[in-house]
Image (spheres, rainbow, N blue to C red):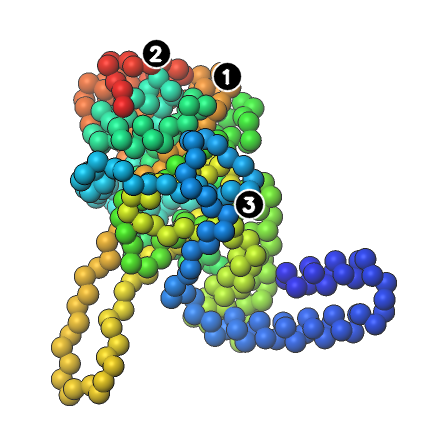
Amino acid sequence: FWLKLGSSAIAKHCSCPLLWPWMLLRSAVIGGLLGVVSLTAPSFVAGRPELLGRTAAWRAIGEHDEGVVVQIGGGGWPTGYLDRLRRFILNGTQHTREAREAREYKFSEAFDSAYTFFFTATKGGLPLAPQVLGLPLGPFLRRAVDPKCNAFFLNAVVLRVDSQASKPPWQDFAIAFHADQSLRPYARGTWLPADGTARTVVVLFLTDVSGGGELEVYDHYSLAESSYRAAAEFAHRRCRGPRAAGAAVDRCLAAAAEQALANMTLSRVSPRRGRLLQFAGSRSHAVRRLRARSPPTPSGPLPESLPVVQLPPPQPRVSLVLEQFAYPPEALAQIPAVWAESGGRPYFAEPALRELFADAAGRPRVFGELPENLLGGGF
């Protein structure tokens, strides 16, 4: 597909007839090679190196430019803070594997395989996040909040080896391609800057992962969406031959998708405990699946009786994600001032806060901006 685009571009600007046989031959040969590769390549890559060429050290929060895709910081967290935050999140999300209650509002289908809660607030309500969620969020929020933003969406994402994969040809992803527009459904019919995408996204990794779970960042969604669709169409055309079936098709689809992504991936960052990332929310991004560890391969002759090697399951990939928006007043008036959900149900650690911000039907009661430091909240 990408090679055909290149050949078409050459032909468009060159009328030399001698080039045509060469281009056709090259397409046929390379197309055949791609067919061989796509039917034999593994659908689950053993390891991917980080792509840090367009990353930079952490700057001031909310500073973005086109030359730097992701900013990386971290370190300096209070002793024991990351472990305490991870335990709180896992305790709060351990029951959300159960069937979710149907809701009018669903923030993203991309997170169907992630066990997560979310918290929504305008600027005055954000300081209440630690009390609402029962999480020690203060150190994180003090470093993560973009002062140019006035609406916020915080969610905890927990991915495991058995988390559901995305649909082919993107089955090596646990969270599919998306841009962060999680508050846009609240403001339907209202003009939003940058199509409602977040101005700043901050991610804090809370665990080290033995394999997989990488965050990949691509171009701005308005530019990248058509490439994703074209890559998926190409993969399905390439792999749906008359003799292809079952696992061979899956391997072919995954390999074709990888070929397309090789030219689209601008940054790839592995989850490392304590790492703090920020990037513009208009950039499309996705998260790879976790990979199970394999027992070590013996280097010498095998004895007649081998002990059974039982490896512990890899620990989950746990992260906090804070999407931050700069919305106009008419849109801000439609955003819940303070709201939290888990498993499709209101999620308030303190009953008094639930009574204040949730109505009898379990839906948001208060919308728009609140006075800052309401109820003595702060972080």
Q: Is residue 91 above or below residue 233?
A: above
Give the spatial CA distance, label 2 vs label 1.
Answer: 17 Å
The front one of 82 and 54 is: 54
Q: Tags 2 and 3 in contact by the CB under 8 Å rule?
A: no
Q: Which structural element holds mark 2?
A: loop
The front one of 91 and 108 is: 91
Name the residue at 72% across, 75% down. 25
The residue beneath circle 2 is 371
Name the residue at 43% across, 31% down. 60
Of badges 1 and 3, the one in the foreground is 3
Q: Which circle's residue, 2 or 1, is located before the other in the chain?
A: 1
Query: Residue 177, image x and y in percent?
Result: 47, 47
The residue beneath circle 3 is 219
Name the residue at 63% across, 73% down. 30
Looking at the image, can residue 101 be seen? no
Query: Residue 178, image x and y in percent?
Result: 48, 43
